[in-house]
Image: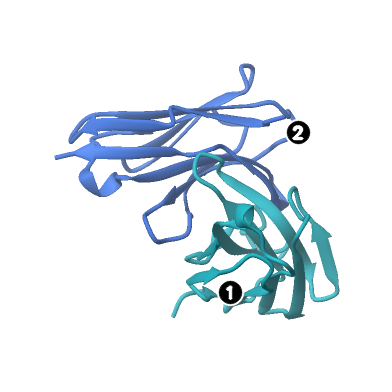
Chain colours: A cyan, B blue
Amino acid sequence: DADVTQTPRNRITKTGKRIMLECSQTKGHDRMYWYRQDPGLGLRLIYYSFDVKDINKGEISDGYSVSRQAQAKFSLSLESAIPNQTALYFCATSDSPGTGSGANVLTFGAGSRLTVL
Amino acid sequence: QQQVKQSPQSLIVQKGGISIINCAYENTAFDYFPWYQQFPGKGPALLIAIRPDVSEKKEGRFTISFNKSAKQFSLHIMDSQPGDSATYFCAAAFNTNAGKSTFGDGTTLTVKP
């Protein structure tokens, strides 16, 4: 099984609909992230969480919300989807400083492709 | 303001050739420079990384060259193989906070047989 699992892998929806993308991890990492990937634009950070009680906005948080249900689960919601939110979304995890050598390394899921019509 | 600029956007190399991808960063506070490799349908995965206290790091056919004064670093793939065909992202990060990574726009590498 994958260390970082994202569901759904593909989703087509209509403008105005509420969408939730889910992420679960078996890495045991405290830190989790949501990124958006658009062609030619690299990866941009939407939200991140350093532990269950910690949520932080990233570079492009407008129009998105997140929930950290448990250490292993971090979901991304689009309250009212719009076409320019069509993108590939990645969940990622990393270790915390002092717990190992992975505080600077991101482990990504396989991605969730979202199309908003 | 783009903090990490990556070039070229796409690259085609013959099998056995050398692939070179370049990145430039602006924020001198970055202290960790990873390269991620992404295959179609997969998420990016760490390929190789370097800290600014060394000028070169080699792992197999993959080498990072780092020029701190010029704020540039590059990925060299020696003896490029068709299996290396992927998208490569450079990033600039903080050693204790991967979430503060700033990514380049990516380079799509195609290695022709």
**Mark 1 is on which residue type?**
Lys
Q: How many marks?
A: 2
What element does badge 1 sit on?
Answer: loop
Q: Mark 2 = which residue?
A: B29
Crowd rating for badge 1 (residues with CA inside 10 Å; few <14, some 14–19, many 20+): some
Give the residue at x 64% y 48%: A44
Chain to which mark 2 belongs: B
Which type of secondary structure does the marked residue at label 2 adopt? loop
Front-lying residue, A33 or A51? A33
Q: Residue at x 56, y 37 (%)?
A: B104
Furthest residue toward right: A53
Quarter of the picture containing the N terminus of chain A is: bottom left
Quick check: A103 above or below B88? Answer: below
Q: Are marks 1 and 2 on the same chain?
A: no
User: Residue A10, can we see it?
Assistant: yes
Q: Which residue is mark 1?
A: A27
- Residue toward you, A39 or B55: A39
Q: Viewer-proximal residue, A81 or B42? A: A81
Q: CA distance from mark 1 to mark 2?
A: 28 Å
Q: Nearer the viewer, residue B92 or B12?
A: B12
In the rendered structure, which amino acid carries the disc numbered 2?
Answer: Ala
Residue at left offset 29%, top offset 45%? B84
